[in-house]
Image (spheres, coloured by chain):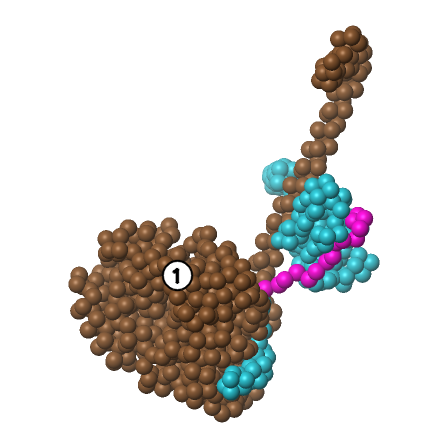
Amino acid sequence: MHDLEVGEHLYRFPGGLKLRHYKQIACRDPLARPDMPEALYLPLQQHQGPVGEVLVAQGDRVLKGQPLSHARNDREVPVHAPTSGTIAAIKSWPVSWPPDSEAECLVLQPDGADAWFETKALDDWRNADPADLVEHIRAAGLAGLGGAMFPTAAKLRGDWQQVHTLILNGSECEPYISCDEMLMRERPGAIIEGGLILARALGAERVVIAIEDQMGAVDKSLTRALAEHDPDDVCRIVEVTTIYPEGGEKQLIQVLTGSEVPHDGLPQDLGLACLNVGTAAAARDAVIEGKPLIERIVTVSGPGVQHPRNLVALLGTPVGDLLVAAGGLAGDVERLVLGGPMSGLPLASNRIPIAKGSNCILVLRRQDTRREQPVMPCINCGECVRVCPASLLPQELHKYLKAGNYDEADSLDLFDCIECGCCAHVCPSHIPLVDWYRHGKGVLRERGVEDARARKARQRFEAREKRIKEEKEQRRRKREQRERKLKSGGDARSEVQAAIERARAGSASPDEDGDR
Amino acid sequence: MLAVGVMLALLLGIGLVLLLSARKWKPDENSVVEQINELLPQTQCGQCDYPGCRPYAEAIASGEADINQCPPGGEAGVKALADLLGREPKPLNASHGETKPPVVAVIDEDRCIGCKLCIQACPVDAIVGAPKMMHTVIADECTGCELCLPPCPVDCIDLVPRRRPFIWSVDTVEVESREAREPVVAEREHA
């Protein structure tokens, strides 16, 4: 099947949209750091999966890069202190997911010294054991920086077939977001070294760095860095056509290989692994410099901010501090969005901290968010079907979800929806389709949880019934035995006598003999 | 004459086959109970007047109980049962209680005297403890059946709403936008 190498020929995915991308407004200035915030708020959960074990308590002094939680397996991801200071509290604080909610956060009061904890670099990574590399990456707390925050270590090892090609995803396709573009311009060497490290950890032979065809500066900087850091010619840069959402994992794989990731499968089933370029740079920092993941590049952009730009933010920095660093607000700001305009999440508060997957803060004014027209009934025009990159039937899904027929929506593969927002974007009736799909997925997920809960309750109930029955049976048998013994007369009496003797011998009093 | 004979033979033959097959593959009582039990919420609360979901399923299968006696299952549960059994759905029988949002039991550990009565009452073994030692509820296993409340001599068990996962609603975006307006920077910009 793989006559051609990945990326040698470019294919197309169905649907998609050509969007104006508004990326350059945030790329005019070089990367900058906001002032040190008064406090950093570190959510314990900055990844998909269970939360690790907390290692610190209120009042503890911590150093920069010190682990604050401990991961017990690959699905858990540790959190590290982004700077030195004191743990002021562990308390509930607004977070981005679920919307308008709070979660346990470690509040770190910086002391300004920015003193490093010990850093553990891996010498000679080019010859290191892949398992050591994965272990190092896991300890550094890496989770997908593209936005999904999937634990990186869990992507690097598992029981799947051999991965032959690592795809580094640099094709950030959403309008406004340019953090990966900035990273590729400013630290191309780190991405290539990181890619080689990740490829070694995976056992992959090739690395493909996918960028958009509109990123001219990136292409140049990466090519220059390739000459320096990739002596064995493992990496290849591929420019893909800018069509939203070609940066989605499944879509990018389809563009590069022409094959689709199976419905309930993984890229690994195709011998591929797909990681964000930011994750690669973070892997490089973890392995070569021994630095855990404590900061990331965040795009602060949109029509509602004075000076759109890319910032290097410590994890835990409140969104408000980044807005200040970007010159403050402009105009009648109505909504803060985490992520891009197509698939981003609305933020309830500017106190919400930056987490590992926060790629962009988009600031929108009232005129940008206002609905032009009310929601109208579906007219079955089929535009949504035409643009759906997952080849779903958006209008049918909507119909079933609106009727509360969740099972039917599930059978139309609701869970294959990547929530890219193309269908809602083109809908002439202005139906918030993606919101319906998110709702449907939530209901179906809860139903799954409830079913699992009922199954477990049933098992426990049945186990208890069985146990009670057995206990009863045992008691009955014992009683019968006793009765039988008593009935046999003299035998029982002698046994009673024997028991009394035993008790006497046990008490072992000194005048025992005299008694006899 | 021959025709009558053939017809008679056929009649008897087919009759015999039907009789035997009906004996051999008779509808399995157990599988019906199993299917009904599958639809019940497994709260094991006994509000249906049977000591658990399976006994209630058996009673429905034998025609002894009606399908509208399970408050935790709610109207949706009645409907599912009606669909399965080919009957008309009917409103929940209010004498068995009403549908309430899911809860879990929580033991106030300061007040618990360690009497073990609640442990014996719990139908799913979701309470752990030893005599004269504090007891506690395994929240993940608790079905919120309320059966532990009456036996507790010191009334130290409370029911709290169960945490439910967040479910996106169609107007989540709109709700958010209202709230995002005020907080933005105001105080920090001047700080």
Instruction: Please state the extent of the stretch shown in magenta in the rendering.
Output: B151-165
Residue density around tag 1, few if under 14, some if 14–19, many if 20 or more, within 10 Å: some
A301 or A176: nearer the eye? A301
What's the residue type where badge 1 is placed?
Phe
Image x and y of residue B176, in percent: 57, 79
Is residue B91 shown to the viewer in this render? yes
Residue B67, picture quadrant: bottom right
Q: Residue at x 28, y 75 (%)?
A: A186
Q: Relative to A516, does residue A190 appear above or below in the rendering?
A: below
Give residue A134's position: percent from left, percent from top: 34, 55
Position of B92 with respect to A125 (left or right) is right
The answer to whether residue A149 shows anywhere in this view is no
A27, A492: nearer the viewer: A27
Quarter of the image for the C terminus of chain A: give it: top right
Task: Label 1: state its secondary structure.
Answer: loop
Q: Which residue was labeled with disc 1? A: A117
Residue at horizontal 76 percent and vertical 22 percent from the top: A480
- Pick the front one: A242 or A103: A103
Tint applied to chain A in the drawing: brown
Let me know if residue A156 is in the magenta part: no
Tell me: residue B167, above or below residue B122.
Answer: below
- Chain shown cyan: that is B
Given the current orientation, which residue lies at the most extreme right position?
B95
- On screen, residue A203 versus residue A440, left or right, reads left
Identity of the residue drawn at 26% across and 71% down: A188
Magenta span: chief secondary structure: loop
Magenta-drawn stretch contains B164: yes
